[in-house]
Image (spheres, coloured by chain):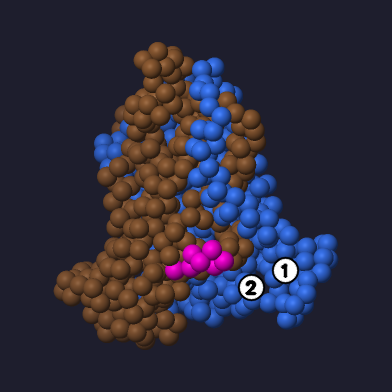
Amino acid sequence: MVEREGIRRYVAHVILWVGIAVVAFPVYLAFVASTQDNAVIANGQMSLLPGSHFLETYYRTIFVGTSGTTREPVGMMLFNSLIMAMSIALGKIFISILSAYAIVFFRFPFRMTVFWIIFITLMLPVEVRIYPTYKIAADLNLLDSYSGLALPLIASATATLLFRQFFMTVPDELLEASRIDGAGPFRFFKDTLLPLSRTNMAALFVILFIYGWNQYLWPLLITTRDDMQTIQVGIRKMIVTSDALTEWPIVMATAILAMLPPVFVVIVMQKLFVRGLVETEK
Amino acid sequence: MQKQATFNSRWLPWLLIAPQMIVVLVFFYWPAGQAVLQSFLLQDAFGLSTTFVWFENYKELFADPDYFATIVRTFAFAFAIALSSLSLSLLLAVMADKPLRGSAIYRTLLIWPYAVAPPVAGVLWVFMLNPSLGVLAHGLRAMGVDWNPLLDGNQAAALIILASAWKQISYNFLFFLAGLQSIPRSVHEAAAIDGARPMRRFWTVTFPLLTPTIFFLIVVNIVYAFFDTFGVIDTMTRGGPAKATETLVYKVYVDGLLGGNLGGSAAQSVILMGLVIVLTAIQFRFVERKVTY
C-alpha cells in the first residue's frame, strides 16, 4: 500500500514536469531563436540551444527595430504599451472606486438605475461593438492618442462591482464612528475606506494591468501612426507573409519582451494575482 | 442592498458617479446603440440615403451560407479549445492537488502563461509550426505528415486551436486547483475507508463535486474562444486559407475593413452581443450555484 502511494507520487511529479515542459517549450524556443542568426533560422537549421547573438539582437530590437516592416524600435512600443496598461488599470480603479462609493454610501434618487446602467456594461466586451466605438473615437479626435487607446477599455463594470461588494462588507459602525469624530464624506473616504481597500486595489491593479497590456484588437484599429503602436500590434506587423523577409530573431525577442512585464507581475505578485482573478470572475 | 448608515448630499454622489457615467455612456451605450440602430438600416451604395428596413439585414445574414458556416466553425473551435484545454488542465490540477514536495513551485510554473497575450501566443506557435523553418514542423514532416497550414484549412484550424488551448491551460488549471482544494479532505478519506480505489474515487467523488467549477470554466472557455482568439487568428492565419479559420469576431473585423455593408456589419455585431448576453446569463446561474454549494 505504502509502496503504491510512492509510485503514484512519482507519477504525479512526472506528469507535472511534462505539463510544465509543454507549457514552457514555445517560450524557451522563442528565447533560443532570439539569440541566433537569422540566416540559420531561415534555413531551418535552428539549434535548440541558445546562440551567441543575445546582446546584438536585443539591442537592435529595443533601439532600432526591424529593417523593413515596422520601422519603429520596440522600446517605443513597450513605452506605448506601458502607458496604455497603466492608464487602463489606474483609470478604471479611479472611476470605479468613486462610483462604488457613491452607490453604497449615499442615498440619492435613481441610485439603482445608475447601478444597473453600469452593471450591464459587464456583459459586452469591446470586440462586439468595435466599429461603432471606432467611429466615435474618430469623431472625438481620439485616433492615435493615449486617451483613445485607454478610454473605451475603461468602460466596463468589473471593478465597480468588486468595490461595491467589498464596501458592502464594511461595518456600519465604522462610518458612524468617523461621523462622531466629525468626519465628512471626503475624510471618511480618504482615512477609512481607502486604507481598507488597499489589498483589493492592488489585486485589481494586477489583473487590469495584464488585461490592458495584452489588448490587441482595439489598439490595432485605433493606431495608425507607427510611433503610437503597442507591442502586441507591432509584433504582428513584423511577420511578413513571405518567410524570407521576416527577421525571426527580432520577432522572437519582441515576443519575449512583450511577455516579460505581465509574466513578471504574475510571478512576483502571485497572491494578489490569484486573488484578483478569482474576485473579478465572481 | 444598501447600508443603514449613509451620507446625505444632493450633489456629491452625482459628482462621484459622473466620471464613470460619462465614460460608460460615450464609449459603451452610444456605440452599442449605434450598432443596434444601424442593423435596422439600409444604406445605398453612395452612403447618401438610408432607409429603415426592419430585420432585412438579419434575414440576409442568415440566408448567407458563408455566415452560417462561420457560426458552425466558431462553435467547433470553441468546443475543441475548451475540451483540450480543460482536460489537460484538470489532469495537471489533480496532480498538483496531491501533497507533493514542491507543489508551490509547480503552481507558479504552470500559471504564468496566463499573462501571455493572444497575439504573442500566436507568434510563438506559428514560429514552431512554420512549414519551412519550424522545429515542430520538421518533426511532423519526419513523421510523414504533409504539413502545410498555409494551404490546408484543417491544419490551419488545428494551429489556432493548439495555440489558443495552450494559452488557456493556466487559467483553467488555477480554477480547477481552487475547486479541488475546496473539497474537504474528509470526503476523500471517507471514500478511501470505503475501499474505493483512487481512479474510482476521482470519478465518483471528486469529479461530481467539481461540476460547478467545470460548468463555470466551460462558459468562460467558450467566451474566450469567441473573443480572445482574435489575436491568435490574426497573427497566425488571418482567417485563411480560404476562410478556414474565420470566426464570428474575425468576420466582423474583416467585413468592417472592407467597408461597404454597414447594416450587415452592424447586424453581425448585434448577434454577437446577443450571444455574449446569453453566455453571461448562463455563467451567472452557475456561479450562483457555486456559491451556494
Check the rendered structure and report the hue given to chain A: brown
Quadrant of the image occupied by residue A271? top left
Asked whether B221 or B262 is in front, the reply is B262
- Most foreground residue, A22 or B252: B252
Where, by quadrant of the figure, is residue A129 drawn?
bottom right
Magenta segment, prevailing SS (helix, strand or loop): loop
User: Mark 1 belongs to which amino acid?
Assistant: Gly
Above or below B151: residue A207: above
Q: Residue at x 48, y 77 (%)?
A: B147
The label number, if any, that marks residue B255 in the structure image: 2
As drawn, A135 above or below A104: below
Q: x%, y% of residue B142?
A: 40, 76
- What residue is disc 1 on? B264
How would you rate the neighbour count of disc 2 (Cα within 10 Å): few for under 14, some for 14-19, many for 20 or more?
some
Q: Which color is chain B depicted in?
A: blue
Q: Reply above or below: A272 against B7.
A: below
Task: Depth check: give the residue in front, B53 or B100.
Answer: B53
Helix, strand or loop at disc 1?
A: helix
Residue A140 lies in the magenta stretch: yes
Residue B232 shows up from this direction? no
* Residue name at image x 57 percent, y 66 percent: A139
Range covered by the magenta-colored residues: A137-144
